[in-house]
Image: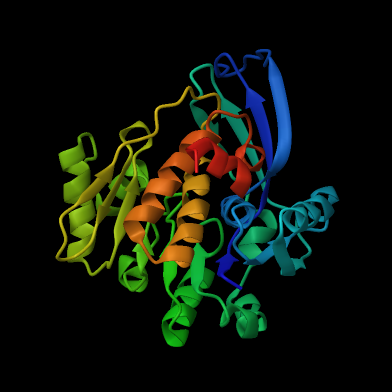
Amino acid sequence: MDIAVIGSNMVDLISYITRMPNEGETVEAPDFRMGCGGKGANQAVAAARLGSRVLMVSRVGNDMFADRTIENLAENGVDTRYVSRTEATSGVAPIFVDKESHNSIIVVKGANAKLSPADIENAAADIEKCQLIILQLEISLETVYAAIDFGRDHGIPVLLNPAPAEPELVLEKVKSVDYFVPNESELSMLTGMPVDTLADIENAAGALLDAGMKNVIVTMGERGVLWLAPGHEPVRIDATKVEARDTTGAGDAFIGCFAHYLVQTGDVRAAMKYANAYAGLSVTALGTQTSYATKDAFLNYLGE
């Protein structure tokens, strides 16, 4: 195995809207899509579509969504041996996408909240064979901390995507991760610092380095991506210029692609460059995982 994703799965309920309704108002939405999502599953699928061997550690519920979630992961080449069923509803994410392709998301964790350190121990023998562990915050913080400790104890690099932003996250317990990958709003919430300008973002990311982080990579949407590491000059890569249709899941596309190329090459800058392009390509199509390119399609897009 190349990558272990310990994290969430969701069913995305996507409404394409002209505007959000006011309180007590009903408005018509011109389109609706339903698909498989969740930050953990999205990142796993993106990496697997690019050719990585991905192990998923997650929990689904006991409802109509569970079978489809597991089938979808398997269809995309993700190892689902450790996707467990539990007595709960599956996670769901109602998503609202406006005419400018901006999105608002409500997350109902459901079974994801029941993913526990015991699930990590159950999968330990196979996680140990992986070259990278990916984490997000749609599962309990207790499980996130346990996974970070597992990676440290077994010499496996850990990438933490602190999304959705969680005010209760204790930086002292996550500063040992090898790659910390927030977006601007998550960076601001975690540091309490402004992120209005590139200089602001660099200062806030620098504060995380001062706190002991090894690599801080900030995804900045239309402003590209920024990488800070101790003893190195900041590296920024401009965003790919595309006509966006739906930005949902673009951050997860970045994480999955970055992880794939990081494991394949060990080159952070190259992995950032590829991930930036992959995320840009994803926003040109509707949906989350449905917008993620296969390896051949991505290489064709790059002209390689």
In this rendered view, identify the residue nearer to me: 116 or 260: 260
Q: Position of residue 197 (x, y in %)?
A: 20, 35
In this rendered view, identify the residue nearer to me: 282 or 67: 282
- Would residue 114 appear left or right of 192 to someone viewing this image? right
- Would residue 146 appear left or right of 52 to someone viewing this image? left
Q: Position of residue 277 (x, y in %)?
A: 44, 40
- Would residue 9 appear left or right of 246 to someone viewing this image? right
Q: Residue furthest front?
A: 304
Q: How is the image coloured?
A: rainbow
Q: Image height check: is 173 above or below 201?
A: below
In this rendered view, identify the residue nearer to me: 180 or 104: 180
Q: Image height check: is 30 above or below 245?
A: above
Asked if residue 64 can be seen in this view, the reply is: yes
Q: Quadrant of residue 262?
A: bottom left
Q: Quadrant of the N terminus?
A: bottom right
Q: Quadrant of residue 115?
A: bottom right
**Point 32% across, 65% down: residue:** 171
- Would residue 32 appear left or right of 2 to someone viewing this image? right
Q: Position of residue 217 (x, y in %)?
A: 32, 53
**Point 48% across, 65% down: residue:** 264
Asked if residue 293 can be seen in this view, the reply is: no
**Point 15% across, 55% down: residue:** 233
Task: Count up the numbered dots.
Answer: 0
Q: Position of residue 107 (x, y in %)?
A: 59, 45
**Point 76% across, 58% down: residue:** 74
Q: Image height check: is 187 above or below 7?
A: above
In this rendered view, identify the residue nearer to me: 226 or 181: 226
